[in-house]
Amino acid sequence: MKLRRVWVMLCVMLLAAAPALADNPGTSPAKPRALASRPGHAAVASAHRLATEAGLEVMREGGNAFDAAVAVAATLSVVEPQSSGIGGGGFFLLHRASDGKNVMLDARETAFTGASSKLYEGADGQPDRDKSINGPLAAAIPGEPAALVYLARHYGKLPLAKSLAPAIRVAREGFQPDDRFLSELRERATVIARYPGSAALLLPDGKPPQTGWTFRNPDLAATLERIAKDGDAGFYRGEFAKKLVDGVRAAGGKWTLEDLAGYQVKERAPIAFDYQPPGKPAYHVVSASPPASGGIVLAEMLNILSGFDLDKMDRAHRVHTIVEAMRRGYRDRTQYLGDPDFVQMPVAKLTSMAYADKLRASIQPDRATPSDSLPTAHPESMHTTHFSITDADGNMVSATQTVNTAFGSCLVVPGTGFVLNNEMDDFALVPGKPNAYGLIGFDANAPAKGRRPLSSMTPTFVFGPDKDLVIGTPGGSRIITMVLEGVLGFVDGKDAQAITAEPRFHHQYLPDVVSAEPGALDANTIAALRGMGYTVNAGEFRWGFMNAVIWDRKTNTLDAASDLRGDSGLGKVQ
């Protein structure tokens, strides 16, 4: 993916006075009274210019960050169907300034009636990846539409129709897809061509479109208008729900009307903890909770790292130490985590400092720990999207949403205008066997009716002594480590553009390999790591599409940035 400079337009807009940001012990650290209590202006960083502009447009019309989140999410559904959409789901981490409340909206997809591992096993007992990634059996029940309705109803200020208006306009009038969209469409064209509704929408004249194509989607505009008018009922019940179920079943799927009617968004308490590295002040971190694994794994990794002075280490030993924290966090993700409505998890233990102390003691200063030597209790993609928002009152949204791999299952039910996800592959469909991102799992993440698959999504807030960060990224199994590196960069004083542009490295327990982007590890560091016993794959490709907003409460300025790896990202301050 070629690099292109992301421009940031600065234009300050005065907004009416609003209640000051309230301190709330246990949700964010106390802020000195000399620091600003509200920004007075707003910022949005998303993966597409039109989505960022939609969020700012809605806030100019009197909406808050939560209304803007509806606008951004819906517009991304229009302009980035390869990454997210109303046929998928996600997690919305919210910070409400008036009372300091932090909450996560869980809009993760759910397994359909009759879902089981047997559906996805080949004759040899191995996973049948075609069934779990392509077509009707790959699609779980979407959560995104319910999330947009819930967000507007419970946290927004504007009518849902007003917040959805920009997305409806873009869908109806059309836009020219960028190179990333067209490239991924070409990669999935063979599967898209299997399904008449998908081919009609995405393959004009029966083949992938070229640069300059204007993509109009009146069916999606009509679907969004129905949701704007009827709320949940416009998608999950009635005539439209029957169209969805009939279309999925005609293609060979097993959805039922009861599956759709029973879907619910859930409010969940986020994972919250303090990170204080040696010689530095404490930072309060708020992140996603299960079925998103990001917050627990992030807490475990940062707790381990809090006992090391990373600033005093050379590059090789710093990377070694961070990788060992990554390895242990991902080991526990594999072993313990799943849908909290179905699985009991030792969350308090995994996020405790006592547990981190034990794990830290097992790290050797100059040797890699082979993953297969760590005891266990048992014998995800670039195609996700993230956006970050801070409004004039200090409300914040960190949202990560997805259809899983590029264009999800590639199945479009005729007349609906959107691709369905392939999130069934995020379950441990065959215990101990890797999914599309190389992640393995066991009973805690097994498929069953109504269950939500484990996710790596990690929307996160970091509240510091004088600066706050809203951050997240797509990237499949690499999401958590990218957010970890972004948080470490923020603690080190980097600005939003530096945080989002930093070359990254990654380890996920299995496979037992350190992967790195071009420029992340120099030749001497790679040689030193290999000397410690690591297998290093460096410089093969780039990953992620991070979006970050920083509020400096000392200068009362906002800093927004989108990842330089993207072709059309835009971080904008208003």
Image (tube, rainbow, N blue to C red):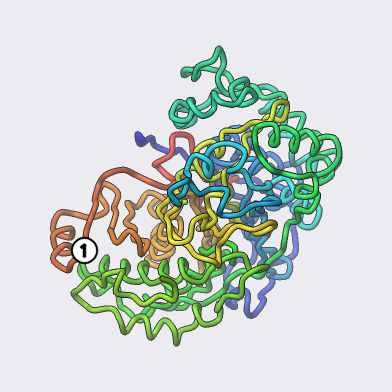
517 up-or-down from 213: above or below: below
> At label 1, which amino acid type do we have?
Tyr
Q: Residue at x 63, y 33 (%)?
A: 78
Lateral position of residue 322 relative to residue 113, left or right:
left
Which is nearer the eye, 12 or 83? 83
- Give how far across and how far down residue 304 sits, in percent: 38, 77
* Quarter in which the C terminus is drawn: top right
Task: Please indicate, yes or no, whether residue 158 appears anywhere in the rendered image.
Answer: no
Which is nearer the eye, 202 or 525? 202
Which is nearer the eye, 247 or 503? 247
Q: Residue at x 58, y 43 (%)?
A: 138
Q: Bin the neighbour count of mark 1 within 10 Å (Cα to Cα): few under 14, some 14-19, many 20 and up.
A: many
Lateral position of residue 244 relative to residue 31, left or right:
right
Residue 244 location, quadrant? top right
Q: Residue at x 22, y 65 (%)?
A: 315
Q: Residue at x 64, y 66 (%)?
A: 37
- Give how far across and how far down residue 279 sits, in percent: 36, 80
